[in-house]
Amino acid sequence: MTHPYAAPPGAGTPSGPDGRIVVNELTKVFGGRVRAVDRLSFTVEPGSVTGFLGPNGAGKTTTLRMILGLIHPTGGNSTIGGVPYRHLRNPMTVVGAALEASSFHPARSGRNHLRILCAAAQLPDRRADEVLDLVGLHDAAKRKVRGYSMGMRQRLGLAATLLGNPSILILDEPSNGLDPEGIRWLRGFFRHLAGEGRTVLVSSHLLNEVQEFADRVVILNRGQLVRQGSIAELTAGTDTVVVRSPQPGPLVEALRGAGRQPDQPDGNTVRVRGIEMAEVGHLAFTSGVELHELRTERFDLEELFFTLTEGAYSGQAMPGQQAPQFGPPQQFGPPPGQPPQPGPPQQFGPPQPGGAPWSG
Amino acid sequence: MVGLIRAEFRKLLTTQVWFWMLLLCVGLTILGVVGSIAGQETDLDLALHVRDVMISASSAFTYIPLFVLGVLAVTTEYRYQTITPTVLATPSRWALITAKLITYAVVGAVFAIICLAVQLAMALPWLSGRHVHTTIGDQKGPLLMAFAVLALFALVGLGAGALLKNQIVAVTVGVIFILVLARLFLLIPGVKYIYPYLPTGAVDSISTDPHNHDDRIINHVHLIAPGAGVVVLLVWGLALAILGAGFTMNRDIS
């Protein structure tokens, strides 16, 4: 089999120098009333994997469609490698985009769908088979799309993005409709793409997944930028050390003496943010305090997301539509998701010989 | 542009719609030939209406399936949202509509050739059997006119599809306009004079024997010359496609 990423004629080189996506003051108002995106600016650096996050209706899809020239912005602009998408000479060799899992004619085979795109982008037809192999759809290539499961359609969409061997990938909720096996496959797929140095901008609501593969995140709420940066930057200094002790009083005093601001949510528990666990242990030891528990509670992307988009799910207006300042501890209700479950790294690749191919 | 045209051909040939439309066109052509020959009781009557026989491939509503095929060329993209990958591959709506126009001009021409071949294969032996002797060379004019109607109606359909976008609306409104509404114009004083410049009137102008002056006047409205009818159909196809690409197809794809 030809290497799936063998560059076709005219294909862009992955991680090329022009892989920067710049969104500048992008605004979209639908029908003169609905402000879906409001003066949004952010940059996706070449060779990075950026998670594009926000609650439903935050304006993610509208933003991606404006970047791709499908929706005309009311104001502002966006460029890919310094050029608006509409002005790219052969866009599929620069940007691969998958926006929805339903953009297929049901009576057409997956292979024919891709071959049509190959013809339009003047790519060799063999690319269709190569990318079908890559996403594990080789056996279903000649089946009509109406017989594909949602997971298979998602993978066909991803295959289409890779036809032109682009250095930039823009994916809108690629995990929608996937079962856990499919999501695991997708995680490996992203790692594979990131490992090749491609620029990936992916919108997703699976925050724990994004945390595993994204270098950076852009968080959007009600059409406005709430926060952007690396996950490490955004969560720096926000871990909480949790201590359980039968003598919390002396420990609280010791922490205050060290310039910390401990919290005592109940009688035996003390919580303190922005401190190393070892330092708390040392303070307890030097204060002669008995400890029953000492642990660090990671402030992960999911908590950050719900902090920054607080109110989005209850219909509350964001105060003044301002980007909230992230900082001191806040009381959160249980997030509508589970805490991250780090698992073993997944190896991405087509179905292994002898292994059961995932059929999504 | 070559790649875009190849892509359009692949879109057409990778579903079965073209086959069923071709079958319908051939079926209507056969009905047209049967009607135009069997409808003449005497051989003398038939000899006087040989032109009607030779143009029956375009006068038996054979252009309707081609119109629908043209409509589907654009509206199917919106119905199944394949317009998104199509526009991602080809951001220019003008390039896209140009490729579709060229493709469907070729498709219309191929359909027309097939229908005319069926028409001639049936009509020539049948006419001969009824002692009416004619050749393709004698009937070049009517055959060319029939070819033009069939070839151009795919473009009219394409233009209508580009302008209306919604498949059901475009097919329903288009077919009702061509078959019913356009003829109602003939009943409205003042307005009726635009009839020859509507697609239906253009077909009548092309199909009606240019030497039969009585038949070329409908409710005091003079049909235009057959050649002018061809131009009218071409203008309808191009104008609708340009309007569609400039306005409807250029709107947000969300």
Image (cartoon, coloured by chain):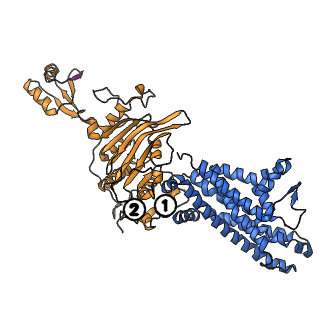
Chain colours: A orange, B blue
A38 sits to left or right of A246: right
> Residue B59: which quarter of the image?
bottom right
> Residue B63: which quarter of the image?
bottom right
Query: Type of residue at label 1?
Result: Leu
Query: Type of residue at label 2?
Result: Ala
A249 sits to left or right of B21: left
Whether the magenta-drawn stretch holds residue A264 is answered as yes
Residue A250 position, x and y percent, is: 13, 20
Give the mark toward the camera: 1 or 2. Answer: 2
The residue under label 2 is A11
Residue B168 position, x and y percent, is: 66, 50
In the rendered view, would you say A236 is above or below B121? Answer: above
In the rendered view, would you say A234 is above or below A117? Answer: above
The residue under label 1 is A117
Q: Are marks 1 and 2 in contact (CB under 8 Å)?
A: no
Residue A293 position, x and y percent, is: 17, 30
At label 1, counting other C-alpha atoms closer than 10 Å, the crowd grade (few under 14, some 14-19, many 20 or more) is: many
| Front-most of residues B138 and A148 | B138
At label 2, counting other C-alpha atoms closer than 10 Å, the crowd grade (few under 14, some 14-19, many 20 or more) is: some
> Residue B152: which quarter of the image?
bottom right
Q: Chain of mark 2?
A: A
* Pointer 1 or 2: first along the chain: 2
The magenta segment? A260-266
Whether the magenta-drawn stretch holds residue A63 is answered as no
| Front-most of residues A112 and A166 | A166
The residue that appears at 35% across and 62% down in the rendered structure is A5
Could you give the CA–CA distance between mark 1 and mark 2, rounded to whole angstroms?
A: 14 Å
In the rendered view, would you say A58 is above or below A244? Answer: below
